[in-house]
Image (spheres, rainbow, N blue to C red):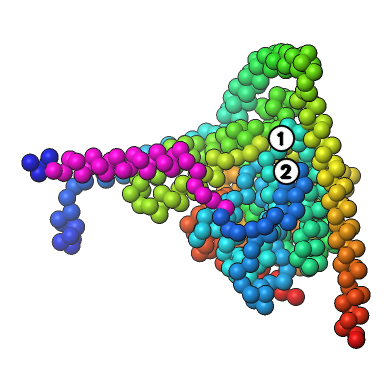
Amino acid sequence: MTEAQQEKPFDPIEAWRGVRDASMDVWAKAMIEAVNSEAYARGSGTMLDVWLTGSAPFREMMEKTMVQALHQLSMPTRQDFLGLAERLTNIEMRLDDLDAKLDAFLQAAQRPATSGKESQ
Amino acid sequence: MAACAVLPDELQRAGERLRRLTRVLTTRAPIAQSPRELVWALNKARLYRYAPVLPPEQRHPVPLILIFAIMNRPSILDLRPGNSFIEFMVNRGYDIFLLDWGCPGLEDKNLGFDDYVLDYMTRAIRKMKSVSGCSEFSMMGWCIGAILATAYAALRPGDGLRNLMLLTAPLDYSNRQGITFSHWTDERYFDVDKVLAAFGNMPAEMIEYGAKALKPVENYIGNYMRLWDNIDDPRVVESWHAMNTWVTDNIPMAGRAFRQLVVDLYRNNRLMEGTWNLRGETVDVSRIRANLLMVIAGADHITPPCQAETLSDRVSSVDKETYRVAGGHIGIMAGSGAAKRTWPHIDGWLGPRSNK
């Protein structure tokens, strides 16, 4: 044993940390096995299903009420916005295709001019 | 008396630690700092080109497009200065393009893999070719991005794709026992249509829970303990802050794409079975001819190695390599060892294959 090791005082925090890390490792491995089991998959699936089934009537009621209220106020609903967004994306795609064609056209137009200059 | 003098110092240090802890837990670190320009946009998707740092004669002429997952921000590829894959590659003379899928809204719930591959990627790559002036390109897909990249490479093999790199690619779902997500998404326990009927898209919170619950003790407890243990080390704290900023910034996954992932891939393994159909076209991986680099993380809980190991045997590529690296799903590209192992290997493989 070196002198430094002999003189190193006992650190209770460090010892506690070692025990903590070791127990965490054991716990972590056990939990990884647990979440990888059929029982966990079944349990979490059941919980999710119960929650979705239980909350569905409230969600539907909220949505219907909101749509009716917006109609009464002559305001657009979420569906109207979603339809508009889809149409905008379609327009963007058309514009993108036009942009690509324009790029190709400009490149093709530049090529003969450049090669013409080079030949002179 | 001596104890009285020490006490204020200890209190001051404890206060400083608490302040540091509060800061990193409640604020966002500045990430994705590398200079870039927007070159293309469609709906929420954006294509960025990173500013070169080397003179033109020292750069590789073949551009590289990065495709990341559709339910996470791609900022993990450019985490922070000094620890950024994009910065590393730009410094080595690559012309880097990043396809950022953006955050889907309810209006995007009908987007599927077919739309991402055949509408978005096709157009983004067309733009990349146009602005780079190069008809050939390299592509790197990571995680779900690797599924997209594989599908693109198989559906458009003659489109100029020279080099394909797939990182932690979840492609083969045949080993159901070895894939935790396969248990969770089993049709006996998980009603994907009910979830999507309720939310439209797959909520970001559920995706985050799913990723963290694979290693619950490490993600929910160990991660914070590691921060506290190293709270006096600014290097570790800043690194943790940046990573936590990315980890907690999830985005929802478009509903139809999520359904395809669960039904077509996790449950029926259609990609490797050769029966995955995107808009009438069958994704046949044997049509992939590009040079192929598979990067597999040895300790990947999200994409176990068995999901990525089989593709190499199915493709028609002559030049192919599988690189196994120690580390987890994200750690191999953003962890402390990434700059020493994974990035140099990618550079070493891609460099000679990116010249005219």
Residue at x-position 46% and y-position 46%: B241
- Apparent side of residue B103 relative to residue B78 in the rendered image (left or right): right
Task: Decide which of B275, B347 is in the foreground and name it.
Answer: B347
Which mark is drawn over residue B296?
Answer: none
User: In the rendered image, which residue does mark 1 sit on?
Assistant: B105
Specify few, some or many for label 2: CA neighbours under 10 Å numbering under 14, 14-19, or 20 or more.
few
Check the residue under mark 1 and report the chain it is in. Answer: B
Residue at x-position 66% and y-position 27%: B189
Q: Are marks 2 and 1 on the same chain?
A: yes
* Magenta residue check for B28: yes
On screen, residue B155 above or below B317:
above
In the picture, the quarter occupied by the N terminus of chain B is: top left
In primary-sequence order, the first of circles 2 and 1 is 2
Q: Amino acid at mark 1?
A: Gly
| Residue B9 shows up from this direction | yes
Q: Which residues are magenta?
A: B5-32
Residue at x-position 82% and y-position 45%: A92
User: In the rendered image, which residue does mark 2 sit on?
Assistant: B44
Specify few, some or many for label 1: CA neighbours under 10 Å numbering under 14, 14-19, or 20 or more.
some
Figure quadrant of residue B48: bottom right
- CA gap, disc 2 to disc 1? 9 Å
Figure quadrant of residue B318: bottom right
Answer whether labels 2 and 1 touch (C-beta < 8 Å): yes
Check the residue under mark 2 and report the chain it is in. Answer: B
